[in-house]
Amino acid sequence: MQQTVLITGGTGTIGRRLTQLLQAQGYQVALLSHSTKTLPGLTVYSWDIEKGEIDLKAIQTADHIIHLAGEGIADGRWTDSRKEKILNSRIQSTDLLAKALAENDHRVKSFIGASAIGFYGGDTGDRPLTETSEGGSDFLAQVVRAWERSELQIASLGIRTVILRTGVVLTAEGGALPKIAQPIRLGAGAPIGSGQQYIAWIHLDDMCRMYSQALTDTTWQGIYNAVAPNPVTNETLTKSIADVLHRPLILPNIPEFTIKLLYGEMAIVVTGGNYVLNKRIADETTFTYQYTDLKTALEDLLT
């Protein structure tokens, strides 16, 4: 019998690619969305997170839930109201799902929730971080800690729960890579700050395949760092992009204070870095990466 996967945040970059992958694998995919517009080949259910409303058919017809919904971290300066939206979009949406699952009959067998390596803090230097490392104390870390706490409510309902702490997802559409690549194409690219801050990256396809395997492999449980095996520095990433695009890097590094002037507190997203390791993925699962080498990943995405 065909199984149904309900995805929240399914119209985002990861959600769109994941939908394609799951449909190719024979799943029926449904979306939970603020928008009521129809999408070809998909059932779209509505919810209103702020009002606490959800179409219960979404829950009652799902075999699995993948929860990606959340306001973009780097979509604007971190004003007080923006910070509130970033936090509430994650907590309130998860609380709404948990309440619907707790109060209604359903057949949901697994819940795969997004999280972020921001759990460890915005800038932790070159200290290796695994799933057992302590969390940070800055805004990002506080958001992720509360986010994961809300997702773990699902586990308390007896539903197998997996949480993927996502690194920097490299994709040709959206996210960090096009923003870094565009000035390099124009001959104006350069590393940021010292360039020595680490970036724990992952190719979009590997990220989506990780979600897919977490659905089917019932040995997956708890929290995993969803990153490729080899973190790189900002300088290495920038130079690798330039190599793949056959463009020179002739400008000096962009001063950190310039980024802080432009983006305020949000600058930590690009001036900070984390050396995050995929220890549980490597040691406890059979997951096989398609892209462990940065240059191979960039060639796939940029050329």
Image: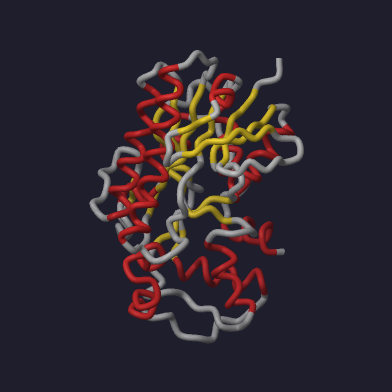
- Residue 222 percent coordinates (x, y): 40, 29
Q: Which residue is drawn at 59% across and 70% down?
A: 181
Vertically, is 167 above or below 299? above
- Residue 7 percent coordinates (x, y): 57, 35
Compare residues 217 and 277 and report the one nearer the observer: 217
Compare residues 125 and 178 and report the one nearer the observer: 178
Compare residues 56 and 203 and report the one nearer the observer: 56
Q: Which residue is drawn at 26% across and 50% down?
A: 136
- Residue 257 percent coordinates (x, y): 33, 79
Quadrant for the N terminus, please: top right
- Residue 65 percent coordinates (x, y): 54, 29
Say left or right for 244 vs 111.
Answer: right
Quadrant of res 9: top right
The coloring applied to the image is secondary structure
Vertically, is 292 above or below 160? below
Q: Count the marks.
A: 0
Vertically, is 214 above or below 142? above
Quadrant of res 156: top left
Q: Which residue is drawn at 45% across and 29% down?
A: 97
Quadrant for the C terminus, please: bottom right
Q: Residue at x 49, y 54 (%)?
A: 168
State the residue lying farthest toward the front. Answer: 51
